[in-house]
Amino acid sequence: MKNEVILVNKLNQEIGSGEKIKAHKEGKLHRAFSIFIFNSKGQLMIQQRAKAKYHSGGLWSNTCCSHPRPKEKTEDAAKRRLEEEMGFVCDLKEIFSFTYKAKIGNLIEHEFNHVFIGQYDDVASLNRDEANDWKWIDLKELKKDISTNPNKYTVWFKIAIKRVGKYLRNKRI
C-alpha cells in the first residue's frame, strides 16, 4: 500500500488504487497534493528535488508534493509528507485543486492535484532521499526566474504557482 496511489475520475471520485510507477507509466489519473509554505515575510520555501527521484530529479519545485495512500485523507497525507520530506509541521489549508497531464521522460504525470498553503518561519531539515536543497524566495524573483529558466522547475509547480499567486493577491494565509 505504501507505493500505491489513489486512482480517481475527473471529478476526483475514487475508482481504485494502483502501483505508483505503473500509474505514471500508463498516465492514469490519480490523486496528488502540492504544498506551498510561506514565511511571515511572504517568501515561498521551495525545494530542489533529489537527483535520484524517479522523475524531475534536480528540479526546483514547491515546498513538498506527493500522493495520499489508499484510505488516507489528502490533508493527513500532506501533513505526513511535509514532516517526512522537510522535517517540520505547520497548519495547512487547501486553497484549490487542478488536474494536469504532462509527459515527463518516459512517464506521464496525470494528477488531480490538491494545493495546500501554510506558514512557517524556521529552517527545513531535509530528507536527502527526497530533496537536495531548499531556500526562501520572493515571488517576484521566482516569477522572473521561471520566465528566464523554465527548465529549472517542475511542470506542476509552474502551473500551480500562478494560481497560488492569484489566491494570495486576493486573500491572506
Image (spheres, rainbow, N blue to C red):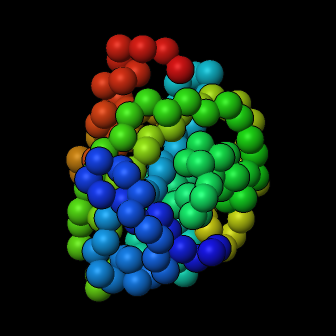
Decide if residue 172 is on the left or right side of residue 30.
right
Q: Position of residue 67 (x, y in %)?
A: 52, 60
Indicate whether 13 appears above or below 41. Answer: below
Q: Residue at x 41, y 71 (%)?
A: 56
Residue name at image x 54 percent, y 81 percent: 52
Q: Position of residue 29 (x, y in %)?
A: 32, 64
Count of numbered tags: 0
Q: Identify the residue at image location x=57%, y=64%.
A: 70
The residue at 48%/51% (across/down) is 33
Quadrant location of the N terminus in the rendered image? bottom right
82 lies left or right of 95: right
Residue 51 visible, this angle: no
Q: Is residue 121 among the parts visible in the rendering?
A: yes
Answer with the quarter of the image where residue 59 lies. bottom left
The one of 42 and 36 positioned closer to us in this rendering: 36
Rendered location of residue 83, percent (x, y): 73, 51
The percent coordinates of residue 143 (x first, y second) are 31, 39
